[in-house]
């Protein structure tokens, strides 16, 4: 599959950013309604619109509901029968082998934490299905607040992968963009994330692994504290900076045409901003 090949390549000057559509998410009430009503036309249309907008893969997250999660294999088969695409499947599929068996091409499991207790098992399950794995740089014993703590967790993930024999090229590390909740940062910056820390983390993760592992972020997390009308501007400003420091993949809103134009040519967007 062309999409499988794209997913296996890292971002270098000769490879473009991997774009993952975020539309198939449980937070989208129209998606939940369409699944409950088995509205195949709407579901395929939602997937197709993201692929036609430029998505290389589709993020599929149906949340914690067992009733919805059991339909993941059906939804994967429905969409892949209609178009060529691959999925970033929520980590619930680690307990749902049928979803991984149903997937055509190389799936990506998104996302487990850097928890030592479960990380090796998640890697072994991903290897059994020849899947990629996204690891969030958080864990029960450490919620990182700075670059060094993120690198500490990144080193843990890399060491575990080497120990269990998982190819580093199948790993994505996510430094986790999040709004800052403490009162002082809300007063100074409206709760917006500490992007300097995220940018430096992405750059140093690349150096730590000699660019063997890849990095990914969920871009919409950066603007969760903003009104909807202000979110696109922030995304369009942040994405070129993330790519400049070495970001390999991004989960984003493919229905935002301005953002997709930036995603297709982030270097040009950065030059215009300068």
Image (cartoon, helix red, strand yellow):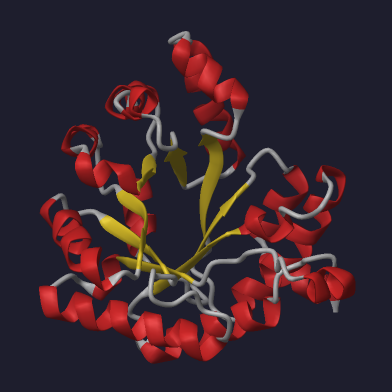
User: Looking at the image, is 144 positioned above or below residue 227?
Assistant: below
Which quarter of the rendered picture does the C terminus lie within? bottom right
The residue at the point 26 percent across, 49 percent down is 106
**Res 63 visible:** yes
User: Looking at the image, is 88 positioned above or below residue 11?
Assistant: above
Which quarter of the rendered picture does the N terminus lie within? top left
For this rendering, which residue is in front, 226 or 262? Answer: 226
The residue at the point 86 percent across, 44 percent down is 229
For this rendering, which residue is in front, 130 or 263? Answer: 130
Image-quadrant location for residue 99? top left
* 271 displayed left or right of 147: right
The percent position of residue 46, horizontal first and vertical second, equals 55, 26
* 269 displayed left or right of 58: right
**What is the count of numbered marks?**
0
The residue at the point 21 percent across, 75 percent down is 161
The percent position of residue 42, horizontal first and vertical second, equals 54, 16
* 261 displayed left or right of 171: right
For this rendering, which residue is in front, 136 or 243? Answer: 136
The percent position of residue 202, horizontal first and vertical second, equals 53, 80
User: Looking at the image, is 15 positioned above or below residue 145?
Assistant: above
The residue at the point 82 percent across, 68 percent down is 186
Image-quadrant location for residue 96? top left
**Res 211 visible:** no
User: Looking at the image, is 272 positioned above or below residue 203?
Assistant: above
């Amino acid at each position: 599959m062309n999409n499988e090949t794209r997913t296996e390549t890292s971002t270098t000057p000769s490879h473009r950013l991997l774009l993952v559509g975020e539309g198939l998410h449980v937070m989208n009430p129209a998606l939940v309604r369409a699944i409950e009503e088995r509205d195949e036309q709407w579901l395929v249309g939602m997937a197709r619109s993201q692929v036609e907008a430029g998505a290389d893969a589709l993020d599929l997250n149906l949340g914690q509901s067992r009733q919805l999660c059991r339909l993941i294999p059906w939804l994967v088969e429905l969409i892949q029968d209609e178009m060529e695409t691959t999925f970033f499947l929520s980590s619930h599929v680690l307990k749902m082998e049928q979803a991984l068996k149903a997937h055509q091409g190389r799936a990506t499991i998104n996302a487990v934490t850097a928890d030592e207790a479960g990380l090796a098992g998640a890697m072994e399950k991903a290897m059994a299905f020849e899947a990629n794995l996204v690891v969030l740089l958080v864990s029960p014993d450490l919620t990182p607040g700075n670059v060094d703590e993120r690198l500490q967790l990144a080193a843990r993930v890399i060491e575990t992968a080497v120990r269990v024999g998982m190819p580093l090229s199948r790993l994505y590390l996510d430094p986790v963009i999040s709004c800052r909740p403490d009162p002082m940062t809300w007063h100074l910056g409206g709760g917006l994330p500490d992007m300097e820390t995220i940018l430096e983390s992405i750059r140093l993760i690349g150096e730590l692994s000699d660019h063997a592992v890849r990095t990914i972020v969920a871009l919409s997390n950066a603007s969760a504290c903003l009104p909807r009308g202000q979110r696109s501007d922030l995304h369009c400003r942040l994405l070129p900076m993330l790519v400049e420091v070495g970001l390999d993949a991004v989960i984003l809103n493919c229905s935002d045409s301005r953002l997709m134009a930036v995603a297709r040519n982030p270097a040009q967007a950065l030059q215009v901003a300068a």
